[in-house]
Image (cartoon, rainbow, N blue to C red):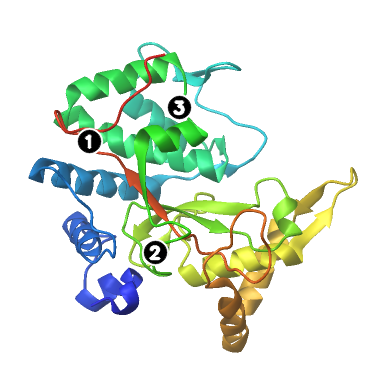
Amino acid sequence: MAPGWDTLQLCQALDLDSEGNSDDLEREILLAMLLSPVPFQFPSYDELASAVRIRKNIVEAARKTTLAFDTNEAERPADCWTYSEDRGFTLIPGSHLVTALQRATQPDESGRCYSFSCYRATEYVILLGIAQEVMASNPELFRRLQQQGERRAIKSGEFHEVFLREYGSMSDPLPLKYFVPGDRTWFRNPDDYSSDVAGYEGSWVLYLGGGRFTNFWKRAEPYTLTTKCLELFHWRNATYRDQAGELQIDEAVVEQRVHTSLQDPAEVERILKMMLRLREPSGVYIDGGCIDTSREYPRRVCPGTSDLLLPDH
């Protein structure tokens, strides 16, 4: 079913339509979890069911997400969010957490695209998936999430610690092609030079299932593992210095080079041999690829067994 733990082919192998059929999406999630080389453990059926639903929520929200990529600027809908240096983006009192997250990430809800980094985008989509589940399964946790959203933002390393579990590691890596729909993962830029461009150290994505990964900038064109590897590879061929002497990457050049490479199967094979390898440790650029050794997924959320602990300040 998944030789070498390659779950990217599950839908094709089992004739599942996980994009058009939410039941098939849940089947793909559960089957991929069952195939994991690292067992997923749950204290109850309710936690397992919630975990599957959260992953489904994340995938469905990610498919609706379209953003404007920006590592320096950030915007949110002014009718839902306010900003301060010490608290980050917080909810305006009276704004509903789920609605505010949808309006920030889904132009179908707000009428426009807002500026995000890829890392922050994954946080908003994951939090939305969790919030949608706990509204029904754990209203008390939802109430605290709402209050937290009004008090201060949880982001970056703290977001990882509060909301996520990680499986796989540098010493015990996951298989190259093992992903569960709803996983968050990082594709590392293995090129020393172009990785110095702000925002291009790598790329944070969510796995959508069916062999597809999020493209938050062009949601109708999700990445395959191949196109994601090609994109990261060609960052090195699109790096230049602007008039201020700052390193930049020309996305139009990247797009053209990816398109050209896709016309040449031998070139694609050559690039994939370099990129479809496990990444090296931070600061090391020798012969590693772009695939991370771990994945991340949401913590437990059910009453009595939740391990999602919000800060008390």
Q: Nearer the viewer, residue 82 or 193?
A: 193
**Mark 1 or mark 2: which comes first in sequence?**
1
Q: Label 2 sits on what residue type?
A: Leu
Q: Residues within 10 Å of mark 3 (few under 14, many from 20)?
A: many
Residue occupying the point 89% across, 42% down: 244
Residue occupying the point 19% across, 50% down: 41
Measured as percent of width and height from the top left, residue 290 is found at 56, 64
Secondary structure category for the residue under label 2: loop
Secondary structure category for the residue under label 3: loop
Q: Which mark is residue 174?
A: 2
Callout 1 touching callout 3 (CB < 8 Å): no
Q: Nearer the viewer, mark 1 or mark 3?
A: 3
Q: Label 3 sits on what residue type?
A: Ile
Measured as percent of width and height from the top left, residue 229 is found at 56, 68
Q: Residues within 10 Å of mark 1 (few under 14, many from 20)?
A: many
Eyeballing the image, is 162 above or below 212?
above
The answer to whether residue 102 is visible is no
Residue occupying the point 10% across, 43% down: 44
Q: Residues within 10 Å of mark 2 (few under 14, many from 20)?
A: many
Q: Nearer the viewer, residue 63 or 159?
A: 159
| Pointer 1 residue | 133
Q: Which mark is residue 288?
A: none
Residue at the outermost bottom position? 266
Which quadrant: the C terminus? top left
**Mark 1 or mark 3: which comes first in sequence?**
1
Mark 3 vs mark 2, CA separation in Å: 27 Å
Residue occupying the point 60% across, 88% down: 266
Q: Nearer the viewer, residue 269 or 278?
A: 278
| Pointer 3 residue | 154
Measured as percent of width and height from the top left, residue 163 is found at 36, 35
Mark 1 vs mark 3, CA separation in Å: 19 Å
